Image (tube, helix red, strand yellow):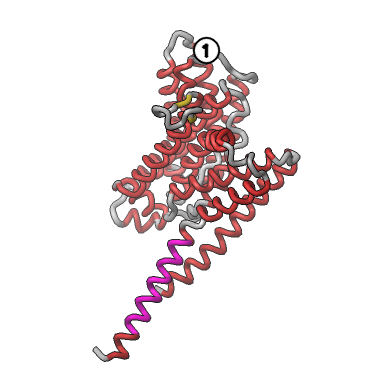
Amino acid sequence: MSTLSKLGTTVSDLRRDRTRLLLFALDNLIWPILLVAFVVFSVLLPEIFTQYQNIEFLLYTSAGLGAITLAEGICLISGNFDLSVGSVAGFSAMAAALFLTEWFPAAPGIVGIVVILVVGGAIGFLNGVSIAKFDVNPFLQTLSTLIIFEGAILVLSSRSVYGLPASYLWLGGGDLTLGGLFPQGMPIAVFFMLILFVIVWFMLTKTRFGRAVYAVGGDEESAAEAGIDTDRVVIVVFVLSGMLSATGGLLLTGFNGGATPTLGTAQLFPAFTAAVIGGISLFGGRGNVINSLGGVLLLSTIAAGLVMLNIDPQIVQTINGIVLFSAILLYTFVQRFRERLLSDL
């Protein structure tokens, strides 16, 4: 091979390496954004924002949203979306709370945990069957589910339910010191959230089912032609979404000390925003749920910072909308740039 040919090959290899590096940076953009946000609030709130108690509270408030973001994320990866994640979290939590306090007050807390997961999974199954077997549009199906179960929460109880067993609240409300590693304690919910993200990541990236989810999200017809039971995949995805939403409801119940009628009301858009900011494709087939954790932490960081700056709640709501709008714009820009880079490989 001539020197000129070798030089051409080297330049081509360097270009490909640069492109791969840029793609990696784009796919993991959420982490530098999170770092910038944390530094900004640390500068605006010196000696306050970085205190242990604030970091602990920031992580604690991320736990319930994290589980619900996972629920939304796996639906997006499969090429669907779920508008009912918040209402499923709220209804499941209320049903389990009433089960333990009024319907079967002698039942142990672990039974309540089973109940909340079964209720969430059952609602997810209803969504999945309607979408997979009856070709109902995911938007219309999950919007209907949202409306039905938001109303059903009030039918069950228009008041908050407290007095739940400590064993039921432990997962969302307990603390661990880990042999002195966290002398002031760290909420169990934080560790549980991290474990949950790792489990879902492993399931989606290291198992046959996970690969099928990505395949269905990328091109459902091609996945079916390859022998994948697409209906089964969609149904299981929505069952998992329902159970993860219910898990979020469980963690939020522990955080609040009880189940409230509005427990899941404000969870949908933050969960959707966190998933999109984390790089999960709006069109399915691509995304890393670990990066959606970065989206959750970013939203919690912004929320905590704005509260500590004493920003008016109405302005906070506006800022949340701006964050969602910016996330969609950023997603659009990143996808176009990504496609351009892929064409160079």
The residue at the point 46 percent across, 19 percent down is 168
Magenta part mainly helix, strand or loop? Answer: helix
Relative placement, left or right, of 267 versus 176 is: right
- Seen from the viewer's position, the closer of residues 56 and 72 is 56
Quadrant into which the N terminus falls = bottom left
Residue 145 visible in image: no
Compared to residue 79, the image places residue 109 above or below, namely above
Q: Where residue 95 sits: x, y (%)?
A: 52, 21
Compared to residue 257, the image places residue 42 above or below, namely below
Relative placement, left or right, of 328 versus 251 is: right
- Seen from the viewer's position, the closer of residues 226 and 170 is 170
Give the quadrant of residue 312. top right
Asked if residue 212 lies in the magenta stretch, the reply is no
The residue at the point 45 percent across, 54 percent down is 284
Compared to residue 249, the image places residue 50 above or below, namely below
Asked if residue 16 lies in the magenta stretch, the reply is yes
- Residue extending farthest left: 1
Q: Where residue 33 sits: x, y (%)?
A: 56, 54
- The magenta region covers 8-25
The kind of residue on which mark 1 rests is Thr
Q: Where residue 180 sits: x, y (%)?
A: 42, 28
Q: Where residue 136 sits: x, y (%)?
A: 49, 44
- Residue extending farthest top: 106
How many residues crowd mark 1 within 10 Å: few (<14), some (14–19), many (20+)?
A: some
Residue 317 visible in image: yes
Quadrant into which the C terminus falls = bottom left
Judging by the rendered image, the residue that carries numbered circle 1 is 101
